[in-house]
């Protein structure tokens, strides 16, 4: 089976099997989106209103900003893979609870193992803290963190602020744009290893 079909089957299975509590309140599940052949996987926090409506991650204002930053480094959504820690919208966009993150964790691990990316890019503190619980994003944004985590197929994590947090905060926005522009060089270096 090719990777595209395998990814489609993986999402179909989890959309049925997921026991995430948020399934009761969300409109639908929001699986990851993009190419299963991606070198880069972006991981956000949880779907928002628009994502919940359409069933696709990062399609609201934050997603538009993400698309613009991708275009700046000559990438399109379909050149990468974009997903979330939590696959169902928390009511009123509240922060996902630890339990809800745990309930969606195996779905994320399955996506990562199918794709086998060179680099994981975390968007925001929730995604970063999922892999690095003790780090502070103000210290780690724009840096590559290395960690071998059981079950995760890469040890390379690049940390970014969340596009939604940066959207209405000028200084965070400038920092995120600057950090984002470092991605091509970083990826080239990792690929050469
Ligand atoms: N914010 C996220 O973290 N994920 C989305 O899919 C949309 C907004």
Image (cartoon, grey):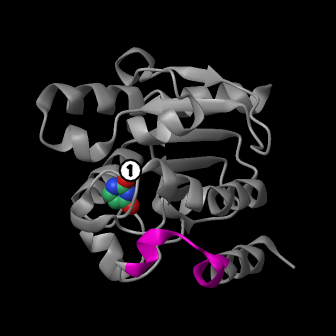
Residue at 36% of width from left, 77% of height from top? 26
Q: Main secondary structure of the magenta part?
A: helix
The image quadrant where one finds the C terminus is: top right
Badge 1 local density, few (<14 within 10 Å), some, or many (20+)? Answer: few
Can you tell me which quadrant of the image ligand 1 is in?
Answer: bottom left
Residue at 58% of width from left, 80% of height from top? 15
Using residue 26 as the reference point, say whether residue 84 is left or right of it: right
Q: With respect to residue 74, does 20 lie above or below? A: below
Residue 84 visible at all: no
* Disc 1 secondary structure class: helix
Q: With respect to residue 146, does 129 lie above or below? A: below
Give 46 or 145, whichever is nearer the viewer.
46
Residue 4 on image: x %, y %? 72, 75
Q: Is 9 inside the magenta-drawn segment?
A: no
Span highlighted in magenta in the image: 14-24
Residue 154 on image: x %, y %? 74, 38
Task: Choose top left, top right, bottom left or bottom right for residue 109.
Answer: bottom right
Residue 158 on image: x %, y %? 54, 30
């Amino acid at each position: 089976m090719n990777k595209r079909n395998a990814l489609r089957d993986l999402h179909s299975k989890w959309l049925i099997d997921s026991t995430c509590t948020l399934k009761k309140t969300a409109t639908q599940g929001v699986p990851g989106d993009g190419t299963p052949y991606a070198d880069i996987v972006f991981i956000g926090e949880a779907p928002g209103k628009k994502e919940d409506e359409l069933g696709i991650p990062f399609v609201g204002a934050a997603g538009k900003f993400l698309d613009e930053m991708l275009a700046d480094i000559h990438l399109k959504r379909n050149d990468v893979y974009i997903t979330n820690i939590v696959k169902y919208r928390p009511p009123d966009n509240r922060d996902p609870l630890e339990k809800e993150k745990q309930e969606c964790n195996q779905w994320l691990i399955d996506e990562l193992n199918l794709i086998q990316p060179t680099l994981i890019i975390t968007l925001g503190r929730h995604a970063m803290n999922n892999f690095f619980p003790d780090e502070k994003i103000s210290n780690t944004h724009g840096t590559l963190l290395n960690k071998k985590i059981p079950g995760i197929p890469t040890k390379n994590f690049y940390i970014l602020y969340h596009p939604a947090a940066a959207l209405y905060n000028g200084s965070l926005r400038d920092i995120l744009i600057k950090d984002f522009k470092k991605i091509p060089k970083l990826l080239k270096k990792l690929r050469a290893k």
